[in-house]
């Protein structure tokens, strides 16, 4: 039986696949549409996903600097490295994830001074759902720009076994 930590590691492998698909979606946008503000918005959304992941790692004590969570004007060519370094750091962090770490309560402060406390389990759940939300936005922007939107639903990555209909 998989532990909750194992499930988070599994779900992050799915997210890594989605990062690659999101990058491919952006690269599919025709050259003549890449000057559109919506294209930059889509790029910045994927950069935001990386920055948000980096910010949570910083709060968890596994990323040295606190990134701007809403980067603007990121270049398409900068995304592969941004994704790679973020994923490598998360894989390293998740490698040591266990029940004790999941139960740990973490406190952090926002720029406006508001303070929060939450378990690592809650934080990891938030980061997982946050990515789904923004990937949907990216796919919608890419499709509107004439690119190839890719379905990143978990069911297509996980590929459940097909069951043939019983013979009658």
Image: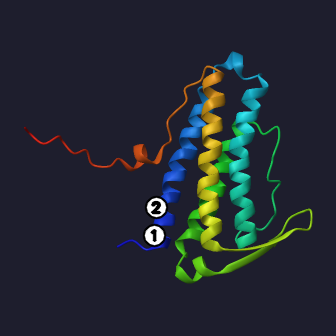
To which quarter of the image does residue 118 belong? bottom right
Q: For residue 10, which numbered disc appears in the image?
A: 2
Residues 111 and 71: in front is: 111
Residue ranking furthest to the right: 112
Residue ranking furthest to the left: 168
* Residue at x-position 72% and y-position 56%: 52
Residue on which the image places disc 1: 6
CA gap between label 2 and label 1 equals 6 Å
x, y percent for residue 99 = 53, 80
* Residue at x-position 59% and y-position 26%: 28
User: For the residue labelled by badge 1, is the local secondary structure a helix, a strand or a loop?
Assistant: helix
* Residue at x-position 74% and y-position 28%: 38
Q: Judge whether 88 appears above or below 40 on screen.
A: below
x, y percent for residue 54 = 72, 60
Q: In this view, does 156 lie to the left or right of 16?
A: left
Which quadrant of the figure contains the N terminus? bottom left
Mark 2 nearby-residue class (10 Å; few <14, some 14–19, many ≥20) = some
Residue ranking furthest to the bottom: 100
To which quarter of the image does residue 2 belong? bottom left
Q: Do the numbered discs 2 and 1 sit on residues whose CB atoms are within 8 Å?
A: yes
């Amino acid at each position: 039986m998989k532990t909750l930590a194992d499930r988070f590691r599994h779900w992050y492998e799915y997210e890594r696949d989605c990062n690659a698909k999101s990058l491919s979606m952006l690269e599919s946008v025709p050259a003549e549409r890449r000057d559109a503000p919506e294209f930059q918005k889509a790029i910045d959304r994927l950069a935001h996903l990386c920055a948000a992941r980096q910010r949570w790692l910083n709060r968890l004590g596994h990323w040295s600097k606190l990134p701007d969570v809403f980067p603007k004007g990121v270049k398409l060519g900068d995304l592969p490295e941004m994704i790679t370094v973020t994923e490598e750091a998360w894989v390293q962090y998740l490698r040591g994830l266990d029940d004790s770490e999941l139960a740990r309560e973490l406190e952090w402060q926002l720029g406006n001074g508001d303070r929060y406390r939450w378990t690592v389990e809650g934080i990891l759940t938030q980061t997982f759902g946050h990515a789904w939300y923004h990937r949907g936005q990216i796919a919608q922007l890419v499709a509107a720009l004439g690119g190839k939107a890719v379905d990143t639903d978990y069911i297509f990555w996980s590929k459940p076994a097909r069951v043939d209909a019983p013979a009658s």
